Image (cartoon, rainbow, N blue to C red):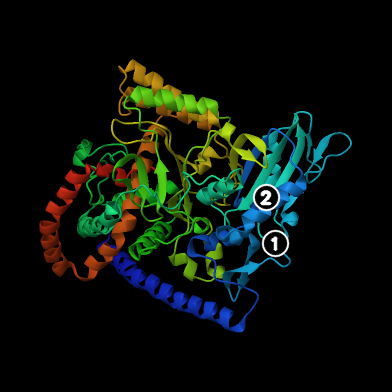
Amino acid sequence: MNPMLSARRAACACAGVPLIFICYLVFSLVRLIVSFSARVTRVKVKKLIPAPCTLLSLLPSINCSVVVTCVLDKHVPLDKVCGKFEKVVEERENERLRYFPKTWMGYSFWADEEDFDVTRHISEIGVDEGKNIVWQAPIVVTLDDPDLDKVEELILAAEFPRGQSPWKVFILRGVANKDVYFLKFHHVLADGFSMMKLLADICDPPIREPIFLRDPAAPSRLPALLSPLITILALISMADWLTFTEVEGKSLPLLWDTGEEEKGGETLSHVVSAQSLPISAFKKVSRRLGVSHLAVFLQAVTTAVGKFWGLRSQTPLEGISSSIILPVPGHPDTLCNHWTEAIVRLPLSIKSEMGRLHALEGDLRKLKRSILPLVYFRTQKILSAFPNRVLQPIFDYSTVSIDVSDFPGPLTELTFCGSRILELHHIFGLMPGTNGAYILQAFGFDSQWPLKNIVGILRTSVLFKDPNRVHKILHEEALQMVTRVKEAAKKNGGKVDLSNDSFEYVTNSSARVLLGVRPPPGTLDDLRQLTALVNRILSFCYLLPHCLIRFFFQSRLNMITNRIVTRISPIVEEFQTNLDLDSSILLRLTV
């Protein structure tokens, strides 16, 4: 490579880093002035839309919505349904259901819906004399044997009325003597977690567990106290990041490994200090995800600065972004996300691995449908400082976060307005131009901690032929995955080992189910490598600030680093010993 060209690229890169931060600071100041002006002038807007929802507020409803389908066993009068939703909207944490996003002075604000009335958001789908559901002619669905999936897609494709809060409830009467409710919400109002919280409020009586912000039974805040220590150690490990050179030809470590040395001499470090990110892997992430280097860099800067500055006080409706997942002391079946303070309970009371799989398989068979957790790409703080016109061209770029989409059950115990809920499932709209990847996780267990990836990552361009096509993971697919893991464990003497040939079998089968075809040779290797790369980019997000610090203060930082490592290492070992922490959970993409 030409040395002059390399030096020129390096100089441009060095100049680009401070330029990005200068732009961010300038636009942040402008954003602050605009927000202050809105209050002083008393225009018809409320507060600025929170940072995680900024880009979401600009996306059209057809491409950024979630539809939840509930099948009830009997008829519920319309006025009773409206009364139920009026009570839900009156709750303080659901008051955003009265707002709609509005652009003022180039930025997105919340604005009150004029003359808000719940009845405008709840309606029955019309049925003509021929017993057909007429929805945006010329599409007609037969009522006698309706294809609910088709109705869901039609509802998802419908635009929200302008000037109204972007949510609707559609009621389809008389389907096999049952009522079907379609709840459609724009993602700016609700992500997966807040949608589950809303559904919990709608049920009779409202479900307060396991969807709540803090576990009252947690005996201490020690895991949260560990979080700053982990961050410090992650920053220290970043001191070696710039020393990495090209490592082409070496095999990348897998996400589900536990720290053993891999081929090519690489070691996957799941110690409390996060794993470093080689420059070559950084480039591969950009190439494999189909986005520019700048997009990956902005993703890293966004998440790193957001987490580094302590974005911890998010309400459920303002978005969920997972980071550090730690077990709650004294509760081995409970994990706590200490950035969002969300509690996730896992069925670990059964000691036997086969017993857990058998119980999980039985629970899945009891449910009508279910959905797997999805890791999807979304924006964070830095981009929210820029005006909407600047953000509009970069819709195809967004950042990484993790959502929890598990609804408490079993469904046979849940009711709505006195009517029993028979089915409940989701359908998602995809953003236009999505070139990211979805990481699909299934219900594998190891001997100590709950979840392992048994699917990997599938490019959306492969998984969805049409970027706007709605995708749904049915319950049967999750059940098949669990059943295959169980069968593989039986062949392995009751031991669930996802690293041997049984894992290859499970992964291959799952990928074939999801894709509908047998994956071509090499696909599984790509999925594994891409999983590891995304795991590394998540680690990199936490380490970037220290990388910039080292760039300007390298010599002094090396001396400080050595001192801190010497003093902190015994403390970390003591914490791990006392808590019996398997710190690999910190970097595993599970919730």
Residue closest to the far bottom: 40
Bin the neighbour count of mark 2 within 10 Å (Cα to Cα): few under 14, some 14-19, many 20 and up.
Answer: some
Q: Is residue 419 visible?
A: yes
Q: What residue does disc 2 label?
A: 84
**In front here: 261 or 16?**
261
Residue 164 is labelled as 1
Position of residue 34 measured from the top left corner of the image (x, y, whole percent): 54, 78
Splitting the image into 4 quarters, where does residue 485 fall? top left
Position of residue 58 measured from the top left corner of the image (x, y, whole percent): 59, 62
Q: Callout 2: helix, strand or loop?
A: helix
Residue at the image position 39 percent from the left and 75 percent from the top: 22
Q: Quadrant of the C terminus?
A: top left
Q: Answer with mark 1 or mark 2, whichever residue precedes in sequence.
A: 2
Residue at the image position 46 percent from the left and 25 percent from the top: 361
- The amino acid pointed to by label 1 is Gln
**Number of marks in the rendered image:** 2
Against 589, residue 293 (above or below) is below
- The amino acid pointed to by label 2 is Lys
Q: Is residue 476 left or right of residue 11?
A: right
